[in-house]
């Protein structure tokens, strides 16, 4: 899998969420990110994370994870279009209701990798 250029920008956020998941004080508890990191053959020490970036990444994701269910509760029959989704696992973390149609969109190579790393779920479509 060639994750060069803009496609490589998914690596630091994935790695930050994975590191956070292993902390005893985890903010996000994104064990799917940790499992994905274990399956990808990448030297994650070279992705450019600095000290504390994992916490910042997890806090930002937590804020979006808190906001999204509020929106979905007010709009239970909506369509979510997640552009440039990378290897984000939000759809699994927040578990939207049955009326929500969720589309993760990214480069075909990224979507192919998502298909190898993450399970299918009802109401969810990944688009390359």
Image: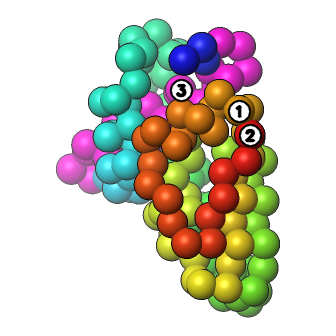
- Tag 3 residue: 11
In-image side of 93 versus 99 (left or right): left
Residue drawn at x 44%, y 31% as measured from the top left = 15
| Residues shaded magenta | 4-25
Disc nearest the viewer among 2 and 3: 2
Q: Is residue 45 magenta?
A: no
Q: Is residue 111 visible?
A: yes
Few, some or many residues within 10 Å of mark 2 (<14, 14–19, 20+): few
Few, some or many residues within 10 Å of mark 3 (<14, 14–19, 20+): many
Residue drawn at x 55%, y 58% as measured from the top left = 90
In terms of sequence position, does the residue under pointer 2 or pointer 3 come before the other? 3
Q: Is residue 54 visible?
A: no
- Mark 2 and 1 residues: CB-CB less than 8 Å, in contact? yes
* Secondary structure mainly formed by the magenta segment: helix
- Kindly report the distance in space between the C-alpha atoms of the residues bearing marks 2 and 3: 18 Å
- Tag 1 residue: 108
In-image side of 5 versus 60 (left or right): right
Q: Position of residue 104 (x, y in %)?
A: 69, 52
């Amino acid at each position: 899998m060639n994750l060069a250029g803009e496609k490589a920008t998914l690596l630091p956020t994935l790695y930050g969420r994975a590191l956070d998941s292993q902390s005893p004080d985890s903010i996000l508890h994104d064990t799917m990110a940790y499992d994905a990191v274990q399956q990808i053959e990448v030297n994650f020490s070279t992705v450019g994370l600095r000290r504390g970036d994992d916490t910042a990444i997890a806090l930002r994701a937590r804020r979006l994870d808190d906001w999204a269910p509020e929106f979905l509760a007010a709009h239970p029959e909506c369509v979510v279009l997640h552009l440039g989704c990378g290897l984000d696992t939000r759809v699994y973390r927040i578990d939207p209701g049955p009326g929500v149609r969720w589309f993760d969109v990214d480069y075909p190579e990224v979507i192919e990798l998502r298909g190898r790393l993450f399970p299918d779920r009802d109401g969810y479509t990944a688009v390359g």
